[in-house]
Amino acid sequence: MGFQNLVLTTFTVALVVSQQGKCNHHQYHKETVYNGDSGFVQRNGKHFILEGKPYYMNGFNAYWLMLMASDPSTISNVTYAFKLASQHGLTVARTNAFNDGTYRPLQISPGSYDESVFRAWVNEMATYLKSIDRNHLLEIGLEGFYGESTPEKKQFNPGYQIGTDFITNNQVPQIDFATIHLYPDRWLPGSSNTAQNVFADRWVQAHIQDSSDILRKPILLTEFGKSSRSSGYSVGERDYFFGKMYNEIYKSSSSGGPYAGGFFWQLLTQGMVGFGDGYEIIFEKSPSTVNVITQQSNKMSNLK
């Protein structure tokens, strides 16, 4: 498989894809009707489209890409990470590209947002970005927490609220697709693997349904993982969790649903001391997990 790397522009992260060194940007349409081949990834209702066909993906997180790329002594980590990702069929890289402000900050405290400021900011920035660049798809980078617009759906949250609203924020017309994260081991500390898997099932299914029925937009699982520092961790449990998440993605994608891809957190290369957070995947040290990832890449790439 040739090197592919997809870049989507978001408010909180940036994602980049190229084919054999040629950059692929993304076409935005105010209407959700496909307008024909353009060389750009487009959105047609709740699906991504490329060259007239549904477009699906399998990817990874590497928040450190810009940091490493800015230093000649560490830039080789970026090149090597993309080489490894390509070898295992990964087509999308997701990396950080944001900072919090000081005046009327979006984050009142770590992980807690002012929803009124956030919603206004999303509207303003999405409108502005589309006015100067209609080729890139936009997402907000939400974790998926339900808010005041749908109080009946708060039952799917992991027992707390951080100030964002999955439904309202993603209904902004200029936002092209929705996102969720999934860290049941961190969100439900002290719970069993069984309880975490039940939560994950409900979380994923609720968001698939809302993306399909309410938002009418594609949805991506842009962060998920299982930490080696969590109680009850084993490589086997991590592989099972990855397989479970990948199966849900494939099940939806292969049946015409909006769930179009997933990005595990996070890919590191060997020797990146200090960047590990328990969730890291180092391909050379994780053969069984790499096998699960590669199988998903192959399945997604064969979807028509």
Image (cartoon, rainbow, N blue to C red):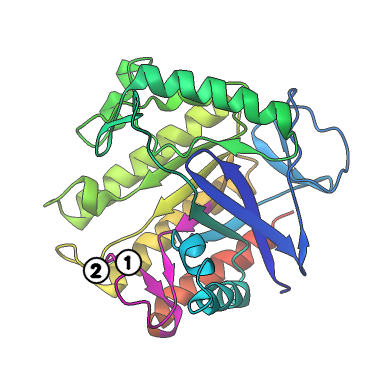
* Prevailing secondary structure of the magenta residues: loop
Q: Which residue position holds label 1?
A: 238
Residue 57, image x, y percentages: 62, 55
**Magenta span includes 281:** yes
Q: Is residue 59 visible?
A: yes
Amino acid type of the residue that numbered disc 1 sits on in the rendered structure: Arg
The location of residue 67, given as percent across then percent down, is 46, 63
Q: Does 151 appear above or below 246? A: above
Along the line of sight, which residue is nearer the eye, 236 or 121? 121
Q: Residue at x 21, y 57 (%)?
A: 193
Neighbor class of circle 2 (other Cα within 10 Å; few <14, some 14-19, many 20+) is some
Q: Earlier in the sequence, mark 2 or mark 1?
A: 2
Pointers 2 and 1 in contact (C-beta within 8 Å): yes
Is the residue marked by circle 1 packed among few (<14), some (14-19), or many (20+) residues within 10 Å? some
Residue drawn where x is 35% and y is 60% of the image: 241
Q: Residue at x 84, y 48 (%)?
A: 39
Q: Which residue is mark 2?
A: 228
Distance in Å between CA atoms under marks 2 and 1: 9 Å
Residue 295: assigned label: none
Left/right placement of residue 48 relative to residue 259 reads right
Write the start and end of the magenta stretch as one range.
262-284
Residue drawn at the location 31% of the way across and 77% of the way down: 273
Classify 68 as above or below 129: below
- Give the total of numbered labels: 2
Q: Is residue 233 left or right of residue 215?
A: left
Callout 2, which amino acid?
Answer: Ser
